[in-house]
């Protein structure tokens, strides 16, 4: 639901607002950068997420296929080629050097920030297309690999374009929401008791007036942001600010360390940095105070708390082509009225398969009887002695 609502609010509405009033052709077509959703897919064990694009594509396809099963998909998703342009922080000497290698490859985008729009496809074809494929060239460039001679000559610091749309009274609302979150997490840290996700969501909804669906989603995003934030806090590397677990009944919980106060201090600082700057700016792709790796988790939290919408453009990832068929179901998802049944059907098929395999291998069948039943299963025939799973789960 976070992906579907985030796409509608944070990207599609901004795209439509930027279109001329009379525009009709291609107005429902847009390209989406996976970085705009990276904050949603934090690893449960806190490990760094290496491939947000794959996660976003999977989530989009799940939404599309689930909607198609109901009769009509709100959008159609297709992968699009790699970005051929990239934003980079360059001094004037390095920019001139790039243009000496390939005339006109580096165009000044933001003079104050020293950001250039570099035509990576032209740069690659001018000298390196016989040595590397374009995806290899781009990967080596963004990872500053020694295998690419260009990295020894110049230092191109990747940047991302951040576009913000703040909601009314964001300052006041942030204070209220932050105070409620602090009370919930600080109490759990003081008591040393498990903080169950469902209890945290219920308390947040009661204290702030958020719907239970929005509060549940907000708690999940905050927990993911804590894990992402800790990865980039060098002095807290040895401290587990948050330890996640699941009970035998499937209830998810957190054990909260008192150092959680540092996270909320960072969140306040990030809000101040974002709110005081321009609505369109460029972030270096690093873990500096104003870098994309530090600010993206904060952007995710602030968007989930309905304080802003944001879009990130650039980086090393591919983009996705989306054609929006209709917005009603997207609007419902944004308001919390969405449930994807496809994972439930997949889980049911898995449960039925486990039940069948357990029955086959614990019922004492001879080899011939066992293979007869396996054959019946793959032919779609009723299996003698076994209650067949539902047609939907087969």
Image (cartoon, grey):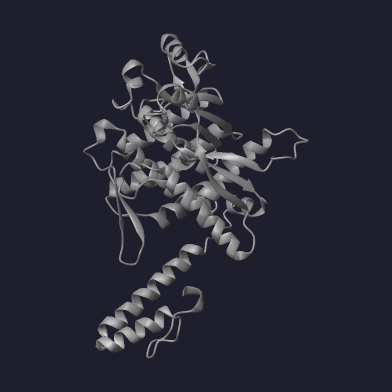
Task: State the residue at coordinates (47%, 36%).
Answer: 299
Which residue is at the front of the view, 207 or 28? 28
In this view, which residue lies farthest toward the bottom? 385
- In the image, is residue 289 above or below residue 189? above
- In the image, is residue 150 above or below residue 142? above
| Left or right side of 345 for 224 | left
* Residue 394 screen position, x and y as percent: 46, 75
| Left or right side of 191 for 31 | right
Q: Can residue 206 be seen?
A: no
- In the image, is residue 303 above or below residue 284? below
Task: State the residue at coordinates (45%, 39%).
Answer: 178
What is the quadrant of residue 16 in the picture? top right
In this view, which residue lies farthest toward the top? 93
What is the quadrant of residue 51 in the picture? top left
How many marks on residues? 0
Q: Can residue 185 be seen?
A: yes
| Left or right side of 15 for 316 | left
* Residue 284 screen position, x and y as percent: 42, 25
In this view, which residue lies farthest toward the front? 130
Task: State the residue at coordinates (45%, 81%).
Answer: 380
- In the image, is residue 235 above or below residue 102? below
In this view, which residue lies farthest toward the right? 22
| Left or right side of 242 for 161 | right
């Amino acid at each position: 639901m976070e992906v579907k609502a985030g796409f509608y609010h944070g990207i599609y509405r901004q795209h439509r607002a930027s279109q001329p009033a009379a525009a009709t052709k291609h107005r429902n077509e847009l390209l989406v950068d996976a970085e705009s959703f990276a904050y949603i897919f934090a690893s449960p064990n806190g490990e760094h997420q290496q491939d947000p694009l794959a996660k976003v594509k999977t989530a989009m396809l799940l939404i599309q296929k689930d909607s198609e099963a109901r009769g009509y998909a709100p959008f159609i998703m297709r992968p699009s080629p790699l970005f051929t342009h990239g934003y980079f922080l360059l001094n004037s000497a390095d920019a001139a050097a790039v243009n000496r290698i390939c005339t006109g490859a580096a165009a000044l985008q933001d003079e104050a920030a020293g950001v250039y729009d570099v035509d990576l496809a032209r740069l690659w074809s001018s000298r390196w297309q016989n040595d590397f494929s374009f995806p290899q060239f781009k990967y080596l460039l963004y990872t500053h690999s020694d295998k690419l001679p260009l990295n020894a000559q110049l230092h191109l610091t990747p940047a991302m374009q951040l576009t913000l749309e703040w909601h009314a009274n964001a300052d006041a609302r942030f204070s209220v929401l932050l105070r409620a979150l602090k009370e919930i997490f600080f109490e759990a840290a003081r008591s040393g008791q498990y903080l169950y996700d469902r209890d945290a969501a219920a308390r947040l909804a009661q204290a702030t007036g958020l719907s239970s669906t929005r509060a549940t989603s907000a708690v999940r995003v905050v927990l993911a942001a804590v894990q992402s934030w800790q990865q980039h806090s060098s002095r807290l590397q040895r401290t587990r600010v948050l330890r996640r677990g699941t009970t035998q009944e499937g209830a998810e919980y957190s054990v909260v360390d008192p150092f959680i106060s540092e996270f909320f201090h960072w969140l306040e600082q990030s809000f101040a940095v974002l709110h005081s700057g321009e609505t369109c700016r460029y972030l270096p792709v690093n873990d500096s105070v104003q870098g994309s790796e530090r600010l993206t988790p904060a952007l995710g939290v602030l968007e989930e708390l309905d304080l802003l919408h944001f879009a990130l453009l650039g980086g090393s990832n591919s983009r996705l082509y989306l054609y929006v068929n209709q917005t009603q179901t997207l609007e419902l998802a944004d308001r919390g009225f969405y449930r994807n049944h496809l994972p439930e059907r997949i889980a049911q098929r898995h449960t039925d398969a486990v039940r069948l395999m357990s029955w086959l291998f614990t019922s004492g069948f001879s080899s011939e009887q066992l293979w007869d039943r396996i054959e019946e299963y793959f032919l779609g025939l009723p299996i003698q002695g076994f209650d067949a799973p539902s047609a939907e789960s087969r």
